[in-house]
Amino acid sequence: MNKQTIITILFALVAILLVSIAMKGQKKSVKSAEAKPKDAVEQKKPQDDAVLTYDISSLQDSASLIILVIREYNQLGMVNEMKGQRLKMAKTLSIGFSPRQSVQSDSMVTVYVRPDSRNGLARDLVLKPVPDAPETFYLYEKVPIRVSALRPNTFIPLALYGSFWWDSKYKICRFCGEKELTEENIKESDYFKHSPHYYIIGAIFSDNAARVIPL
Protein backbone atom coordinates (compact mmCIF):
# COMPACT_ATOMS: atom_id res chain seq x y z
CA MET A 1 0.00 0.00 0.00
CA ASN A 2 1.63 3.24 -1.11
CA LYS A 3 1.67 6.55 0.69
CA GLN A 4 -0.95 8.16 -1.59
CA THR A 5 -3.45 5.37 -0.89
CA ILE A 6 -2.95 5.67 2.87
CA ILE A 7 -3.59 9.43 2.72
CA THR A 8 -6.78 8.89 0.68
CA ILE A 9 -8.07 6.34 3.20
CA LEU A 10 -7.34 8.72 6.10
CA PHE A 11 -9.23 11.55 4.40
CA ALA A 12 -12.19 9.24 3.81
CA LEU A 13 -12.26 8.18 7.47
CA VAL A 14 -12.11 11.81 8.63
CA ALA A 15 -14.99 12.72 6.29
CA ILE A 16 -17.13 9.83 7.60
CA LEU A 17 -16.39 10.90 11.17
CA LEU A 18 -17.39 14.53 10.48
CA VAL A 19 -20.65 13.48 8.80
CA SER A 20 -21.49 11.21 11.75
CA ILE A 21 -20.88 14.04 14.25
CA ALA A 22 -23.03 16.46 12.22
CA MET A 23 -25.91 13.99 12.01
CA LYS A 24 -25.83 13.39 15.76
CA GLY A 25 -25.93 17.13 16.39
CA GLN A 26 -28.83 17.56 13.99
CA LYS A 27 -30.85 14.77 15.66
CA LYS A 28 -30.25 16.29 19.05
CA SER A 29 -31.40 19.71 17.82
CA VAL A 30 -34.60 18.34 16.30
CA LYS A 31 -35.41 16.38 19.43
CA SER A 32 -35.08 19.45 21.65
CA ALA A 33 -37.53 21.38 19.44
CA GLU A 34 -40.29 18.77 19.56
CA ALA A 35 -43.55 20.02 21.10
CA LYS A 36 -44.64 18.42 24.34
CA PRO A 37 -48.25 17.19 24.64
CA LYS A 38 -49.06 20.19 26.83
CA ASP A 39 -47.75 22.61 24.21
CA ALA A 40 -49.86 20.96 21.52
CA VAL A 41 -53.00 21.37 23.61
CA GLU A 42 -52.26 25.03 24.30
CA GLN A 43 -51.78 25.73 20.60
CA LYS A 44 -55.33 24.49 19.92
CA LYS A 45 -56.85 26.98 22.33
CA PRO A 46 -58.54 30.09 20.82
CA GLN A 47 -56.37 33.19 20.54
CA ASP A 48 -56.75 35.64 23.42
CA ASP A 49 -58.19 38.32 21.14
CA ALA A 50 -60.87 35.91 19.86
CA VAL A 51 -62.78 36.20 23.16
CA LEU A 52 -64.03 39.34 24.89
CA THR A 53 -64.21 39.01 28.69
CA TYR A 54 -66.08 41.37 31.01
CA ASP A 55 -65.88 41.79 34.78
CA ILE A 56 -69.47 41.75 36.07
CA SER A 57 -68.66 40.97 39.71
CA SER A 58 -70.06 44.32 40.84
CA LEU A 59 -73.57 43.06 40.03
CA GLN A 60 -73.40 39.82 42.00
CA ASP A 61 -75.21 41.28 45.00
CA SER A 62 -77.98 42.91 42.92
CA ALA A 63 -78.60 40.37 40.14
CA SER A 64 -79.06 36.62 39.96
CA LEU A 65 -79.73 36.10 36.24
CA ILE A 66 -77.95 36.92 32.99
CA ILE A 67 -80.37 37.27 30.06
CA LEU A 68 -78.67 37.24 26.66
CA VAL A 69 -79.94 39.83 24.16
CA ILE A 70 -78.82 40.08 20.52
CA ARG A 71 -80.07 42.95 18.36
CA GLU A 72 -79.71 42.94 14.57
CA TYR A 73 -79.46 46.17 12.58
CA ASN A 74 -79.16 47.50 9.04
CA GLN A 75 -78.84 51.11 7.91
CA LEU A 76 -82.58 51.66 8.48
CA GLY A 77 -82.49 50.56 12.12
CA MET A 78 -83.11 47.46 14.22
CA VAL A 79 -84.66 44.61 12.24
CA ASN A 80 -84.65 41.76 14.76
CA GLU A 81 -84.11 40.96 18.42
CA MET A 82 -83.28 37.65 20.07
CA LYS A 83 -83.59 37.37 23.82
CA GLY A 84 -84.79 35.17 26.64
CA GLN A 85 -81.87 32.80 27.26
CA ARG A 86 -81.03 32.85 30.96
CA LEU A 87 -77.80 32.03 32.77
CA LYS A 88 -76.88 32.10 36.43
CA MET A 89 -75.02 35.18 37.60
CA ALA A 90 -71.20 35.04 37.60
CA LYS A 91 -68.10 37.14 38.18
CA THR A 92 -67.10 37.30 34.52
CA LEU A 93 -68.88 36.99 31.19
CA SER A 94 -67.07 35.95 28.01
CA ILE A 95 -68.24 36.49 24.42
CA GLY A 96 -66.55 34.65 21.57
CA PHE A 97 -67.14 34.34 17.83
CA SER A 98 -66.46 31.28 15.69
CA PRO A 99 -67.11 31.05 11.91
CA ARG A 100 -69.23 28.10 10.86
CA GLN A 101 -67.23 25.53 8.92
CA SER A 102 -69.38 24.62 5.93
CA VAL A 103 -68.71 23.53 2.37
CA GLN A 104 -71.88 25.29 1.24
CA SER A 105 -71.52 28.73 2.73
CA ASP A 106 -69.41 30.87 5.03
CA SER A 107 -72.33 33.17 5.79
CA MET A 108 -72.81 32.00 9.38
CA VAL A 109 -70.99 32.70 12.63
CA THR A 110 -71.62 31.22 16.08
CA VAL A 111 -71.51 33.53 19.09
CA TYR A 112 -70.66 31.90 22.42
CA VAL A 113 -71.60 33.47 25.75
CA ARG A 114 -70.12 31.89 28.87
CA PRO A 115 -70.37 32.98 32.54
CA ASP A 116 -67.08 32.30 34.36
CA SER A 117 -65.73 28.95 33.11
CA ARG A 118 -69.12 27.24 33.03
CA ASN A 119 -70.94 26.06 29.96
CA GLY A 120 -72.90 28.84 28.35
CA LEU A 121 -75.00 29.56 25.29
CA ALA A 122 -74.34 29.39 21.57
CA ARG A 123 -76.35 31.24 18.94
CA ASP A 124 -75.90 31.21 15.15
CA LEU A 125 -75.89 34.60 13.43
CA VAL A 126 -76.61 35.06 9.72
CA LEU A 127 -74.05 37.19 7.88
CA LYS A 128 -74.72 39.35 4.82
CA PRO A 129 -72.39 39.85 1.83
CA VAL A 130 -70.75 43.26 1.51
CA PRO A 131 -73.05 45.33 -0.76
CA ASP A 132 -71.62 46.64 -4.07
CA ALA A 133 -68.40 44.61 -3.73
CA PRO A 134 -67.26 43.00 -7.03
CA GLU A 135 -67.18 39.58 -5.37
CA THR A 136 -69.18 37.91 -2.60
CA PHE A 137 -67.43 38.74 0.67
CA TYR A 138 -68.64 37.90 4.18
CA LEU A 139 -66.37 40.16 6.22
CA TYR A 140 -67.23 40.96 9.84
CA GLU A 141 -65.29 42.19 12.85
CA LYS A 142 -65.97 42.42 16.58
CA VAL A 143 -65.53 45.57 18.68
CA PRO A 144 -65.85 45.57 22.48
CA ILE A 145 -68.15 48.11 24.13
CA ARG A 146 -66.96 49.46 27.47
CA VAL A 147 -69.75 50.48 29.83
CA SER A 148 -69.01 52.97 32.59
CA ALA A 149 -71.74 51.64 34.89
CA LEU A 150 -73.42 48.23 34.99
CA ARG A 151 -77.09 48.69 35.84
CA PRO A 152 -79.42 45.82 36.83
CA ASN A 153 -82.67 45.15 34.95
CA THR A 154 -81.49 47.20 31.94
CA PHE A 155 -80.09 46.20 28.55
CA ILE A 156 -76.30 46.56 28.58
CA PRO A 157 -74.54 46.49 25.16
CA LEU A 158 -71.26 44.58 25.36
CA ALA A 159 -70.02 43.99 21.80
CA LEU A 160 -70.54 45.11 18.23
CA TYR A 161 -70.22 42.51 15.47
CA GLY A 162 -70.33 44.44 12.24
CA SER A 163 -69.94 44.03 8.50
CA PHE A 164 -67.29 45.72 6.38
CA TRP A 165 -68.46 48.17 3.73
CA TRP A 166 -67.32 48.73 0.14
CA ASP A 167 -65.23 51.85 -0.59
CA SER A 168 -65.96 52.53 -4.27
CA LYS A 169 -63.31 55.25 -4.50
CA TYR A 170 -60.39 53.04 -3.45
CA LYS A 171 -62.00 49.73 -4.48
CA ILE A 172 -61.54 48.02 -1.10
CA CYS A 173 -63.65 46.70 1.78
CA ARG A 174 -63.29 48.83 4.92
CA PHE A 175 -64.08 48.52 8.61
CA CYS A 176 -62.63 51.71 10.06
CA GLY A 177 -63.24 53.01 13.54
CA GLU A 178 -62.37 52.77 17.20
CA LYS A 179 -60.73 49.69 18.71
CA GLU A 180 -63.16 50.04 21.64
CA LEU A 181 -66.53 51.74 21.86
CA THR A 182 -67.79 53.64 24.89
CA GLU A 183 -71.10 55.20 25.86
CA GLU A 184 -69.62 58.55 24.83
CA ASN A 185 -68.42 57.68 21.30
CA ILE A 186 -70.85 54.92 20.33
CA LYS A 187 -73.43 57.29 18.79
CA GLU A 188 -70.84 59.07 16.62
CA SER A 189 -68.87 56.02 15.49
CA ASP A 190 -68.27 55.45 11.77
CA TYR A 191 -69.24 51.83 12.28
CA PHE A 192 -72.88 52.78 12.60
CA LYS A 193 -72.69 55.37 9.82
CA HIS A 194 -71.23 52.99 7.22
CA SER A 195 -71.65 49.36 8.28
CA PRO A 196 -74.56 47.93 6.22
CA HIS A 197 -75.34 45.13 8.68
CA TYR A 198 -74.34 44.51 12.30
CA TYR A 199 -75.29 42.92 15.59
CA ILE A 200 -75.17 44.34 19.11
CA ILE A 201 -74.58 41.56 21.65
CA GLY A 202 -75.55 42.47 25.18
CA ALA A 203 -77.24 41.28 28.33
CA ILE A 204 -79.75 42.16 31.00
CA PHE A 205 -78.55 41.45 34.54
CA SER A 206 -81.75 40.81 36.44
CA ASP A 207 -82.59 40.11 40.08
CA ASN A 208 -85.92 38.68 38.90
CA ALA A 209 -87.08 37.78 35.39
CA ALA A 210 -90.43 39.44 36.02
CA ARG A 211 -88.76 42.78 36.74
CA VAL A 212 -86.89 43.12 33.45
CA ILE A 213 -87.56 46.53 31.93
CA PRO A 214 -89.32 46.20 28.53
CA LEU A 215 -87.00 46.83 25.59
Image: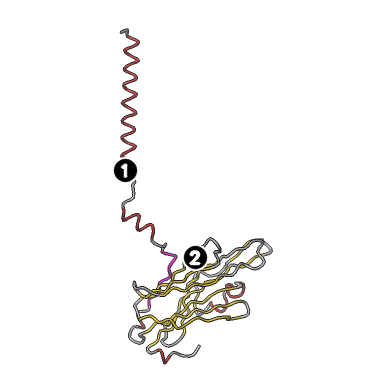
Give the structural element (helix, strand or loop) at label 2: loop
Residue 37 lies in the magenta-colored region: no
Which picture quadrant has residue 88? Answer: bottom left
Q: Is residue 50 magenta?
A: yes
Q: Nearer the viewer, residue 122 or 131?
A: 122
Q: Position of residue 37 (x, y in %)?
A: 31, 54
Q: Is residue 159 left or right of residue 78?
A: left
Give residue 63's position: percent from left, percent from top. 36, 86
Highlighted range, magenta:
48-55
Query: The disc labelled 1 sits on which kind of residue?
Result: Lys
Residue in front for this viewpoint, 102 or 67: 102
What is the crowding at mark 1: few (fewer than 14 residues within 10 Å), some, or many (at least 20)? few
The residue indicated by pointer 1 is: 31
Position of 104 relative to 122 (above/below): above
Q: Which mark is residue 100?
A: 2
Disc 1 element: helix
**Magenta stretch: helix, strand or loop mostly:** strand
How much space separates mark 1 and mark 2, taking CA atoms? 37 Å
Q: Which mark is residue 81?
A: none
Residue shown at 53%/70% (left/top)? 178
Task: Look at 48% across and 74% down and name the residue there.
Answer: 159
Q: Nearer the viewer, mark 1 or mark 2?
A: 2
Of the 4 image quadrants, the one containing the N terminus is: top left
From this view, report whether residue 90 is shown above or below residue 141.
Answer: below
- The reply, left or right, for residue 51 in relation to residue 7 is right
